[in-house]
Image: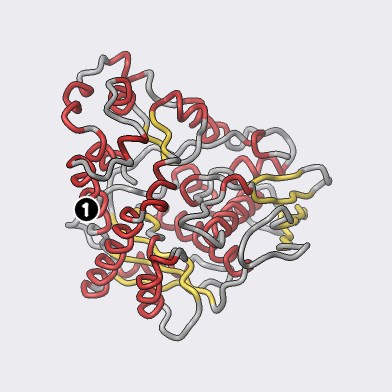
Amino acid sequence: MRKRQFLAVLGGGVVLAAAGASAAFVFTRRPDRALAPWARAGMAGQDPRRMALSYAILAPNPHNRQPWLVDLRVEDQVTLHVDTTRLLPQTDPHNRQITIGLGCFIEQMAIAASTQNYRLDVSLFPDGSDPQALDGRPVAVIRFEKDPGIAADPLFQRILARRSLKEPFDLTRPVPGEVLAALGASVRHGALAGSSNAPATVATLRALTHAALELEINTQRTYKESVDLLRIGKAEIDANPDGIDLGGALFDSLAALGQLSREQALDTTSAAFAQGRAALLANTDTAMAHIWLTTPGNSRAEQIAAGRDWVRINLTATALGTGLQPLSQALQEFPEMAGHYRQAHKMLSPDGGTVQMLGRLGYASAVEPSPRWPLDAKII
């Protein structure tokens, strides 16, 4: 959710008071500790695995849960596990989206490893998997194989600038067809990319993604899942650099004035909430094009592949100066979303298969990176 939209939900009439914060206060509200992994990427020592992992931890993932854990005890090998305390049981009951996030992690590791002439030999779910839920079994065993012939993936240069751009897009700037073609051409792991900037298709998908987001907000348990993951102000973000961060002088001021809390976010009877919800929903209405990924089935391996291809699309969009934001609500598998789920699949995958990812494209100003746990916090 966009920070300024949360401000509409929670800030109310104290915005002007908070905006008067001193310059010294403003400059000390940046959660530098939580953002340090972005500055320290590539500074993880001589081990090529740690170097690649220092970039992998910057990969996009659902609700910024960073659900990865890695075991480095076998030489030249990374064993990837999911942290089962970081799942999203309400909006992602079968852990499909979390698995896609793990695929993003693997691909970003592979891109970084290529710059040191390493190829990754990835063995997925070597001990099997459960289609209903992830568990303690390994997600992947990844061998680092030295390959002097491997070229550095040019997308590596875009990792530090990559964002999931959760800002309203410029309604005067269309997304050209050649951008859509380049994004589609970036996939290489088996997912099928579709896209459209046709006004009628964009209008239909705007309406669908708007309705799906509204349903998630209006379903108490799915909305609460997001609210529970709010990190409000510098202290909370630095202490728990994951979830939905609301940082900066303005949010710290609002919290200090008693105008910003998780309890207030859950008060759906207030006028401020109604106004804020309208702002959140309006975000979907500025899509200038859409892109989606489908797979023939819905196996764990296909979910990983979709994640690997999604991060390639995101990095390619970064290279092209195009903003991309995932809009996953219509693809979620909780019962209340079933109607929108069917509509999305009928429209985007009419011949069958699974729509794994859907996002909006457009242009907006650059934003700060999302907080990250340091690499050492993710090593078993």
Q: Secondary structure at mark 1?
A: loop
User: Residue 48 at what x, y percent from top left?
Assistant: 72, 43
* Frontmost residue, 70 versus 322: 70
Give percent across and percent down for residue 170. 21, 53
Amino acid marked by disc 1: Asp
Q: Could you say which is closer to the camera, residue 123 or residue 223?
A: 223
Is residue 380 left or right of 307 when viewed as pictured? right
Residue nearest the viewer, comparing 129 with 269: 269
- Relative placement, left or right, of 41 versus 211 is right
- Rendered image quadrant of residue 119: bottom right
Other residues around mark 1 within 10 Å, as few (<14) / some (14–19) / many (≥20): some
Does any portion of residue 195 appear in the rendered image?
yes
Q: Position of residue 229 (x, y in %)?
A: 45, 40
Q: Residue furthest front?
A: 269
Q: Quadrant of residue 42?
A: top right
Pinpoint residue 174: horizontal percent, then vertical percent.
23, 62
Name the residue rendered at 70%, 51% in the picture: 80
Residue depicted at x 53% and y 63%: 309
Question: Foreground: 45 or 259?
Answer: 259
